[in-house]
Amino acid sequence: MIVDDSLTVRTVLTRMVEGDLALRMVASARNAERALLELRNTPVDVILLDLEMPGMGGLKALPKILERAPDTQILVVSSLTEEGAEHTLAALSMGAADTMLKPRPGGFDDTYRASLLGKIRALGGRENDADIVTPPESVGPAMGGHAKQPKAVAIGASTGGIHALNQVLQALPTTFRLPIVITQHLPASFIPVFARQVKMAGRRPTHIAQEGVEIRAGEIVVANGLGHLVVRRIADRLVCSTSNQPARSGCLPSVDPMLASLSRCLDGRVLGVILSGMGRDGAEGAATLVEAGGTILAQDAESSAVWGMPGAVAKAGLASAVLPPAGLVDAIIKHAGAAAWK
């Protein structure tokens, strides 16, 4: 379903979707009120939702949409403005799965079409359902009791990950002192708003990972969106750098360099958490971390919008536990040990 007050946008997006034989447009609505009426009788896998519309508006309607169609995935089609970023990230924290920038006139080209259809197919479950497996009860070396006690927590996330990330940060006690570093796939223009959102959810100082920013106990650092968050050691301090060296995952920023560099700096004493996301980003970094004695936790398939990233580490046998967000919080606290409260 497409929900957008612009007839032009609805027409262009409909043509793009209907050009893919695997997809079918089942409804189109010019406002949120009409969309809610359509959902009474029309099963929908994915909704392309504009947030700024006359009437109720997409942001106010989002909880109602998710209540009426809880199994439907929401792809927010958003503007590049700061206000657009605020609204989009609010929607993602409320349960929307992913965002797609709404291009300027003339920007609906083949590249945009390929990206849009890829997101829709992933959110509709066409890329991952056949690969979902039930991980064994004991996977990864951490379950064998040989994992090193972590000195930092590193979280990687993409599609659907912001909602899970907020749940994890909100549930972690403010007395939890291990530093937290985060790589979330987002446009760079969204990162300042994202950092403010993370600060509110985590209730602790939060910084954007500019060159030389220090990683400290009781604080959070988020990747800046312009490059990979890479960690360096200077004497007894951990500081951030930005790298634009291509990652094999194709992501910028990528979770892999964050995990690998932090693992090197802390001799594997890192607790990695992989949340919902498309693709396999984080799998290589997770393998490096586990080999050095670190621990990886992964979000489960049922609670993930897309079980690509967490599924990759789970199926590779790298995850010590595969859990929903609430379970991940308990596992983080358990694995962090006494050092997390000093």
Image (tube, helix red, strand yellow):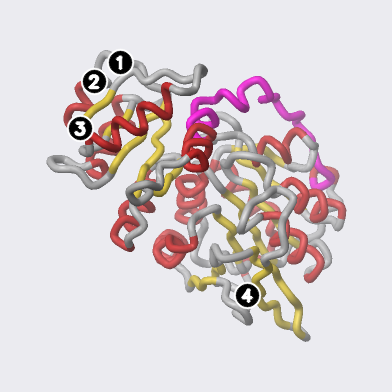
- Mark 2 or 4: the one toward you: 2
Say which amino acid is labelled 2.
Answer: Glu
In the rendering, which numbered label is found on residue 215? 4
Return the residue at label 1. Answer: 42
| Nearest to N terminus: mark 1 or mark 3 | 3
The circle drawn on residue 68 is: none
Label 2–label 4 contact, CB within 8 A: no
Q: How many marks?
A: 4
Label 3 secondary element: loop
Q: Nearer the viewer, mark 2 or mark 3?
A: 3
Left/right of residue 185 with respect to residue 41 in the rendered view? right
Q: Please state which amino acid type lies under the numbered disc 1.
A: Thr
Q: Are marks 2 and 1 in contact (CB under 8 Å)?
A: yes
Vertical order, 226 against 130 (above or below): below
Sequence-earlier tag: 2 or 4: 2
Q: Name the residue rendered at 26%, 36% in the picture.
A: 8
Q: Secondary structure at mark 2?
A: helix
Residue at 32 percent of width and 60 percent of height: 81
Q: Secondary structure at mark 4?
A: loop
> Which of disc 4 and disc 1 is earlier in sequence?
1
Q: CA distance from mark 2 to mark 1?
A: 6 Å
Q: Amino acid at mark 3?
A: Arg
Residue 141: x and y in percent read 84, 45
Q: Which residue is mark 3?
A: 30
Asked whether the viewer can see residue 297, the reply is yes
User: Which amino acid type is shown beneath numbered disc 4?
Assistant: Ile
Bin the neighbour count of mark 2 within 10 Å (Cα to Cα): few under 14, some 14-19, many 20 and up. some
